[in-house]
Amino acid sequence: IGLPLTVALYVYNKNFKLSRATFFHSLITVLWSFRMLTFFVWREYISWPALHEKVVEIQRRMTIPFASKLLCWLVYSFFYFAMMSMSWSRLQQGVGAKWGIVGRLGLLMQVVGLGLETIADLQKNGFKSRNRHAWCNVGVWKWSTHPNYLGEGLFWWGTYLGHGFYSLPRTILATTGLGFIMSVLKG
C-alpha cells in the first residue's frame, strides 16, 4: 500500500522541496503502511503460525471463482487508493500549501493514532503469546475493548483532516477512503 506513496513522497520532495508539515503528513502514512506490513507478517508467520496454517487450510478447501477473487481485489484496490489519496492530495498542493489549525490537528491525530494502535497491538501480541484463548486485559486493553481500532480510526481521521480540502474531486475520493476504513473498523 505504501510503496507508491513512498515513491511519490521522494519525487515530490526532491523536485518541490515540500514543507515539513506536508512531508510529515505523508511520511507518517508511509510509517503506518510499514507498521501494518510488519505486524501482519509477524502475526501470521512468527507469533501465531497455527492461525496461519488454519487460514491456508480453509482457503485450500474453498472454491472461489477467479472472477470473484478479481472483483474483490479491484474493489479493495480502489478503496486503498482512495485512502492513500489523502496523502497524495496534500503532496500535489506543493510548497505554498496552507495548513491551518485543522491540518495541524490532523497531524497530531495521525501521530497519536499510530502510537496507540502500535502500543495496543504489541501489548495484545505479548498477552496472546502467553494466554492464547484469554481476553486481553492488560495495558491500554484495560481501558478499551479495541484500542487498536481506536488508534486506527484516529490515524485515518487525522490523515483525512490533514489532506487539505482544496479540490472537490480529491475531497470526495478522500471521503470515500475514510468511509471505507471506518466501515471496516465498525465491523
Image (tube, grey):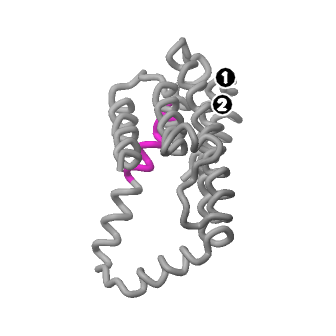
Q: Quadrant of residue 110?
A: top right
Q: Residue at x 67, y 51 (%)?
A: 122
Point out residue 78 in the picture as x, y percentages from the top left corner: 38, 52
On the image, numbered disc 1 is attached to which residue?
A: 19
When the figure is inspected, residue 87 is found, relative to residue 104, above or below; the finding is below
**Crowd rating for badge 2 (residues with CA inside 10 Å; few <14, some 14–19, many 20+):** some
Which secondary structure lies at badge 2? helix
Residue 103 shown in magenta: no
Answer with left or right where residue 99 lies relative to residue 63.
Answer: right
**CA gap, disc 1 and disc 2:** 6 Å
Q: Residue at x 34, y 70 (%)?
A: 70
Start and end of the magenta stretch? 78-89
Point out residue 39 in the picture as x, y percentages from the top left corner: 63, 57
Q: Residue at x 64, y 23 (%)?
A: 21
On the image, numbered disc 2 is attached to which residue?
A: 23
**Crowd rating for badge 1 (residues with CA inside 10 Å; few <14, some 14–19, many 20+):** some
Q: Amino acid at mark 1?
A: Ser
Point out residue 154 in the picture as x, y percentages from the top left corner: 51, 33
Q: Residue at x 41, y 46 (%)?
A: 185
Residue 87 shown in magenta: yes
When the figure is inspected, residue 103 is found, relative to residue 7, above or below; the finding is above
